[in-house]
Each structure stands twice: as structure tokens, then as C-alpha cells.
Image (tube, rainbow, N blue to C red):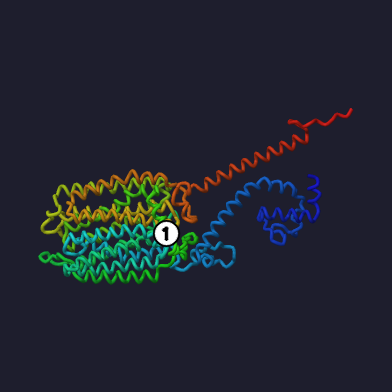
Amino acid sequence: FCARQRVATTAAGKRSRHAQYKSLYPKKMGRDYSDDGSSGSSRSGGGDDWDDEGTDIASKFKKSKSSSSSQRSKSSSSRRDRDRSSRSRSRSPGAERRGGGGDGDESPDYVDYNSVSFLRKGFNQNIVAGMVAFTGPGLFNAMNGLGNAGGSDPKIAATMNATLYATFSIFGVLSGSLFNILGTKILMSFGSLTYAFYAISVYLWGTDEKYASMAIIAAAILGLGAACLWGAQGTMTLSYALEAQKGLFFGIFWLIFNMGGVMGGFISMGINMAPDEERASAVTPETYFTFCGLMIAGSIFAFFFVISPSRVVKADGSAVQFEQTDAAEGIGELKEIAKLFKNRYMLLLTPLIIQSNWFYAYEFGGINGLLFDAPTRGLNSALYWAISGISSYVCGTYYLDSEAVGGRHKRAIRGLALVSIINLGQWVYAVLYQFSTGYDKGNPPDPPINYADGGTYMAPMLLFMYCGLADSLVQTYAYWIIGAISNSPSTLSRYVGYYKGVQSFGGALSWIIEAEGTSYRTQLLICSFLAVLFIPFTYMVSTTVQDKGTDIVGNGEEFAENAAVLQNDGYAESRRFAEMEQRARENRSSADSRRYAEMHGIGGSKKKPARIV
């Protein structure tokens, strides 16, 4: 100790201690030591006079040793984060350009969110996705809202929908791999274009029955295009959002997307309005020409305004980490897709996913298509999608993302309870109306109900509006719970692909049942059963959601198997570091005790010094 003190009094010793102290405490007690050894503004002396007041350097260094283990733990965590960051930058070719700081202090993966261009912001890309969906599937929903897809034969319309959902289910599962290989721009643009081809084919089928086969082929092609568009959209919406924004992002998207159905419904209503004695029974050509033009415009819009995920920046300034898969790695993508069918979370969510699209056949065929005339079907369609969009935004933003409701764990469980109660109430209402009126296939109201019919119109109209509300809540919760499992774009693209594929498989089965002539009462009972079935399985997933999530993504694999472990990663690491620190303190204490014992000859087999007589 005395030797250390003597060395510390020399200039060389002071410089050595100064450099060592500065490396450990670059900014201590307001001092800012510069590279040349000079002190900050809080000291008036030069760099070598920083200890002129007789500060005990040895004691300072001793204190620094007491915190060495925590420093080592922090440095190991920092090294792990730097390695993860470097791997992410190596996967993302545009990462260095995203740094944009210019001062060398900012990490290339974090930028000033306000300084990036409009289209590179994740929030704005989500709006772009909503606008593309507005012109494609939004107007498709409006056409389905017309009843019988605007055609004249309900059986052909049901066959078209079954074909569409069957191909959608196949390519939907593959859409995650298509996203990872082709990216967003191609999928969104191509997907929107297939909706235009579908609209043209339906129009031709409406003019001549010989085009029925063409309409069915167009439905199959639309299944491929819809899988591309929805796979890209779901990944964009969930991976571009922060943990606390996923409900908001989906709510905004769903609101914009459903405005397509609202606009299409009002267009159809306006075109098909006529005096009571001349109520329209078919949809006019102008409806289809308008739809087709908007769908083509949406495809062009997607080509110019959708950008690569690697260029997108989240609201906190972090870059979206996305590694576009080479086409030669397609076999690996197929293996990842196969793993989804063994993934615990996906299997548990399957009943919810199937139910979320099953009811469309009943709602648009057994309620809107069966009960109302063409102008009223257009009005109902507009109201249905308006309520669906608004309720999705409210549920996602002010409930699922709201800290006032509770932590994420409580929101997952309470959100499921809210959605389940409202969804079950819908089917209770439907059962009461269906069985009290007796309306079914072969027994529609005559004449069809019109919006001017007063009380006769209000009861089925409110039922249809209720269906729109329940639909949006189920879809919003399903996306939110999937977003709670992962943040990786590559992993989410596969999850969303599984979601859309299995969802479309359920939709295909429902439309096959419709095409086979199954009564609407039977279809209603199936819908009610599925609404009850998904609750316990989804509850098992909701209980695994943790209050603390993460926005750090690595290679995506750590998210796929155990979200709960990942979300508690910070807590687990802190606990491990605390245990390491405790062991280090115990070891140091034991070593000090041994040295003391050796010096004083206490304990052990140490011989006592010989006594001098």
C-alpha cells in the first residue's frame, strides 16, 4: 500500500492513474476529461493537476475495483448488443445509409425520425398499405356486399368464393416466403391488379352466363393475388410498429381499408336507386367499370409508393431489420413454413383464425343477399364496413394499446374477454332473428326489404351492423396477439401467411357449404359453435403475453418458439448478472480472508513462527 502511495505521488504515476480513472469514469462529478488529459470546466488546473487537492488515488482505484464485475457485465451486454447490431447491419444493405447522423455519434440503426423522408416512415408506409387495400380488397368487399357478388346465379357466386378462398389458403401459407424473396412492392402491386381482373370477369359473367367459367378462373387468380397483398400488408403493419403501436397501426389500416367498402357501397346504392315500382334487381355496368378503374389505380399507386422494408424507419428512429431471402434459398423458406404447423402458438390460434373468415358466407349471403334489394344491399355494405373500420381503430388504439387498461398481459386477457362477449352476442341476435322470422333459402321476403320500409328494415339492418362490429374486433385482436409473439419481419411474414392461409381455408369451407345449398340456419349454428370454440385455445395464448416486450430483433428464430422467454430476456439477464456479481463478491471476500489468515498464521495447517528464547 505504501509503495502504491509513493508511486502515485510521482508525475508518471499520476498520469497512469489519471488515464486509468478516466477510462472507468469519463464523466465523474461533472468533469469531462478530454483525450489530452485536460480536465473539464469544473477544474481550473491542467490535466496533471487533477489530483492536486490530495485526492487519494489508491482509494479511488480501490473503489473502481469494487465495481469491476458490474462494469464487466455491462460491457458483455454492450458487446452482445454491438454484435447483434453489426449482424443486423450486415443483413441490411441500406443500414449504413440510414445512419445519417453525420457526427459519427449516432448508431447506423437509429436515426432522427423527423429527418427521414415521408415514405420511409413506418407510420406512413402503413397508411400506403391501407390505401392500396382501399382500392383492392376494399372494393371487393363492396362487390360481395351487393349479394351474390353482383351476378345473377347464387350457386356460381358461391363456387367462385370457394375457389378464391381455396387458392388463397394454399398461397396464403406460402406468402411469407414470397414476401421474404420478392419484397413488398411486387406483392402489393401484383395483388391489387388481380382484383381488377376479377371485377372485369364478374361483369362479363353478369352479361352472359357463358362467362361463368372465366369468372371462376378469375377467382382462382385472385386467390393468388390476395395472398400476396395480404401477406405483405400484415407484415408491414405489424413489423413497422413499435410494441405500443401495433393496435394503432392495425386500427388505422383497417379503417382506411374499409373505406373502400364504404365508398363502393354508396356508389352501388346511388347507381341502383330507383322509384318503388322500379326497384333495381341487378347491378349496373357502371358499378363494375368504376370498381375496375380504382383497382388498376391502386396497383399503380403501390408500384410507386411502397418501398423496401430495409429502408423503413420506426417511430423511435430504429431501422426495420429485414433480410431479403435469395431465390436459391427457397427450400429453406419451405422448411420454415413447415415448422409453422408444429408451432404451439399458431396451433392454438387456429380455431380463432378459422372463425375470423367463416362467417362471411352467412352474413353476406344469408342476411344481406337474401333479405334486401340491390340499393339497400349497397347501403348496408357501406354501413357494415364503416362500423368495422371505426370499431377496429377504437379497439386497437384505446384498448389493446392503452396502458390505462393494464399491462400487456392483462390487456391480452381482457381484450379476449371483450371480443368474445361481443362476438357471442352477435350470434345470439342472429339466432333469435333467423328462427323468429323463418327466412331461409327458398323462403326470402317478398318483396325484398328496402331501406325505406321502416321497422321491417331496422331489425335486420342492426343485425348486419352488429356483424360488422364483431368482425372488426375479432380481426383486430387476432392481429394484435400475433404481433405480441414476434417483431421480426421475416418471422411475422410467415405468421401472417399462416394466418391468412388458414383463415382462407376456413372461408373456402364455408363457401363450399353455401354452394352445396346448405340452409342458412345450419350455417348459423356452425358459426355460433366456432365462436365458442376459439375462446379457450386463444386464452392459453393470451396468458403467455408478457407486460414487457421488446423491439430488438435478431435473426427471428428467437421469437418463433418462446415469446415469453424472449420478453423476459432483460429480467433474466439482470438476474444472471446479479448472481455473477454475488459470487464474485464472495470469492473476493474469501480470498481476502485467506490472505489475512496467512499473514497472521490463523487456522489451517500453517505453522506458527518459532518463538525466540
Q: Can I make out residue 265 in this image?
A: no
At 52% from the left and 63% from the top, the residue drawn is 111
At 17% from the left and 63% from the top, the residue drawn is 374
Instruction: Classify 571 as above or below 476.
Output: above
At 80% from the left and 45% from the top, the residue drawn is 2
Between 505 and 137, the residue placed more toward the observer is 505
| Amino acid beneath label 1 | Ile
Between 401 and 485, the residue placed more toward the observer is 485
Which residue, as the protein is rendered here, is positioned at the far right? 613
Between 375 and 533, the residue placed more toward the observer is 533
Residue 163 appears in which quarter of the rendering?
bottom left
Q: Which residue is mark 1?
A: 331
How many numbered discs sit on the rendered protein?
Answer: 1
Q: For the N terminus, which image quadrant? A: top right
Q: Can I make out residue 573 in this image?
A: yes
At 57% from the left and 68% from the top, the residue drawn is 102
Is residue 540 shown left or right of residue 277? right
Q: For the C terminus, which image quadrant? A: top right
Secondary structure of the residue carrying numbered label 1: helix
Label 1 neighbour load within 10 Å: few <14, some 14-19, many 20+? few
**Image x and y of residue 502, in percent:** 32, 54
Is residue 212 shown left or right of residue 133? left
**Image x and y of residue 47, in percent:** 74, 59
**Image x and y of residue 203, in percent:** 21, 69
**Image x and y of residue 400, in percent:** 38, 51
